Image: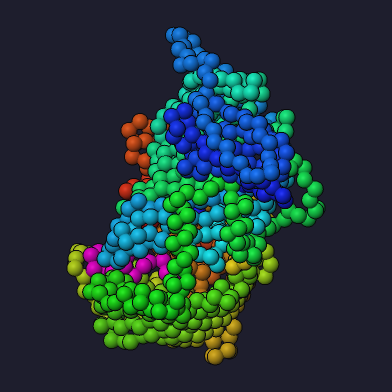
Amino acid sequence: MRSTVLILVFLLYSSAVSAIRLSGHVSDEKGLPLPFTSVYAEGTGKGATANSDGDWFFDLPEGAATLTFRFVGYKALSRQVTVGPKSQVINVSLLPEATMLKELTVTTGGEDPAYAIIRHAQKMRKTYLNQVDEFKCRAYLKGLGRMISAPKKILGEKVEIEGADSNNAGIFYLSEAVSDYYYKKPKEKEVMIASKTSGKPRGFSWNNYRGARFDFYKPLIDMGGVSKRGFVSPVSPSAMLYYRFHLIESFKERGIMVHKIEVEPRRKTDPAFTGTIYIQENTWRIHSLNLEVTRSSGLEYVDTVRMKTVYIPVNDSIWLPGNQQAYYHFDVFGFKGNGYAYASLTNYKITPKLEKKFFGSEVMTVLPQSNKKTDAFWDSVRAVPLTVAEIKDYHVKDSIVILRSSETYLDSIDRKGNKFEMMNIINGYSWNNSFHHRSTSVSGLLGAVTFNTVEGLVLNPDILISKRLDTTYGRTEFSGALRYGFSGKQLYGQAGYLHTWNPIHYNRLEMSAGRYVAQFNNQDPISALVNLQYTLFNEQNFMKHYERRYVNATWQRDLFNGFVTRLTANFERRLPLENTNKYTFNNIKDRAFTANNPPYQHNVPDSLYDPALAMAPHNSFVITANFQYRIGQKYMSRPDGRINIRGKYPVLSLNYRRGIPGIFNSVADFDVIRIGVRDNFNLGLIGHLHYEAGYGTYLSKAVVPFADAKHFLGNRTLYAVNRANGYQLLDYYNYSTTNAWVEAHCLHNFGGFILNKIPLMRRLHFTENAYFNYLNTKSLNNYMELGVGLGNIMKIISVDYVRSFNRQNNSVQGIRVSVGL
């Protein structure tokens, strides 16, 4: 759920030896609960957060203590208590802030006092951002997701949400965790010591504070997967350009004046928050905040995110977050739901003593025994008491997990799910044996029927057999496909084997063999569905095929952190194919289907050239070695595997291919090498950038069959190819080469940065795309493409205008459409 909900920020409490339980209830002056009130014992670093019902508890050693209760918008309350020898119940009622300045009216031509306060906070922003170079804290983390409603079926397929009821409503995610978080600018590390997930006693929580630590002293708040650009902090240096401020009221808290300021985006579509921020007088630090951002400001996948943060004093001069909360709501494609996540940070230690090599590439580790904690342990450390609904969810799901894991229960579920229905003919059919972790799927007519000029009408069903391996967290898959063209009158088939194991090093072994039909460019630049459309409706057969009788084996492994090795050996017996069907729905004047032979045939030896077919039968044996290295690769260690996290440096790649003559009568005899670099990163307010560049050359080329030449990802259809590394207007094969080449691609999504400033356009929530493609070969010098377009049309469609330029100054232009989230 992390790409969908994203905002997991949380809260923590650590118990002590010989501690006494304190508990209670927090309400307002009318007796209504104040959910997620921050409760902490001053000077101890210990505290808790009330749950959504206003209940709280935590443990303290015996002795005198001062408890402070804080809730945004209410006056802080301090209560002197004597802890021990028995547990105590302390119920409190908080009052609205004691107002000294209320609903200030600004005279004409005057400035709201809030602007002066914000300017002071802006000047102090860097001071507080850099005030603490190193600290450690304990975090209690909790996340909950709840589905309100969801469609029963999509395209005839049943929609089943794990954890929801028969109406697809209910809690689908509930998890808690306890972590130790370490920070030493700019490095960080988190160690999860306890993990609990409802309905998955063997699972490990995905909650973490490292990935959801929002610091409003930074100019921009990165919302990760729910927005392609950052959101401006109310105390950012550029805040005046994005916000209107209004001083609502001022009050004193423990002798310190605190100003409550309303923040409002100047334009609804600005990447800015709405809500209130509290600033202390004289120190001008953030006291607390209650802000939200909506879809109109650039959110994707979720409609609203509301964030609350309460800062607490760690010592006389340092205040750090003690309570962070995030609430979200989503309503997309019929799925409606909400949830929350919060963190409470306690036991702060400034400049803790750590080993010199404590920080490194590993930014988070989940301890193997973290999911084995007892209920007594959780009762002792849980900083936020469970609500009645959460207790029920844990009880129900955990009590039936053994039943649901039994062979009898799983077989009964499979019998229901494996029942064949008429829509399976269209959408495909799957058979599952859940107890033994096996599954088999067969494609339906929707993906198994196509048409081309070589084979005519094609029936091409796929089958996939899968087995998950619990002991190694790996899997084994067998795949197969049959293919029959009614005009070509040839039956083809292929089979594959995939085995993955050792999730620390991502070991992967793939083998396949068969007699099948392939495109000369193994990147498959045109899909079967698009080729069908252009063949039957436009009388254009862009796809070019040959028959391959092949055996292929590939091995992949992460040799060390950030370094991936992939080795492949491929043998092919290649045979030419001819057009056998010229049928089209739309016979266009002066247009005819082209022969099934690519136009590029430069430097092809006579032994490989057939005047009628352009390709003579031949054998090719090629080995490939691909090396990829992410500089500064970060990763997260879990008992069930390693999760790589991109660092701040790009990915470097080296690819070497060698055609070896003589082996199995192979005629291929060449060496080709390519070096490349790629990366993607967030540019804050102006969106997200991806770039990729490479240089390649043939070191030797005694014999280079056409299928082994360098082909580029071209396109001559309305539908865009991959904009990250493709060419939208380049012919598929005219400029393939066996010489040196240079290629570069740059794609930028502005995320609404420009259109949101245009009054009428901002209501449409479109995003702007721009990209640049470059290619230099011996026959195509300095070819360039420039593209601009609109994205997020109907949430999933992008439309681009593209124009190309080359050395002959022959410009080509076109419209390209792409579909996808």
Q: Position of residue 452 (x, y in %)?
A: 29, 74
Give above or below for 649 relative to 564: above
Residue 18 magenta: no
Task: Find residue 582 and report its image quarter.
Answer: bottom left
Find the magenta span and give its range: 522-541
* Camera-side residue of 681 and 590: 681
On the picture, is 579 further left or further right than 571? left
Q: Position of residue 509 (x, y in %)?
A: 56, 78
Image quarter of the C terminus: bottom left
Give above or below for 447 relative to 253: below
Q: Position of residue 7 (x, y in %)?
A: 51, 47
* Camera-side residue of 709 and 93: 93
Q: Is residue 20 visible?
A: yes
Report the residue at 72% width, 51% height from top: 17
On the picture, is 761 further left or further right than 656? left
Residue 524 magenta: yes
Task: Find residue 304 and report its image quarter.
Answer: top left
Q: Position of residue 621 (x, y in %)?
A: 55, 83
On the picture, is 554 further left or further right than 65? left
Report the residue at 58% width, 28% height from top: 76
Q: Is residue 220 visible?
A: no
Report the residue at 68% width, 40% height from top: 83
* Camera-side residue of 113 and 729: 113
- Outermost residue to the bottom: 664
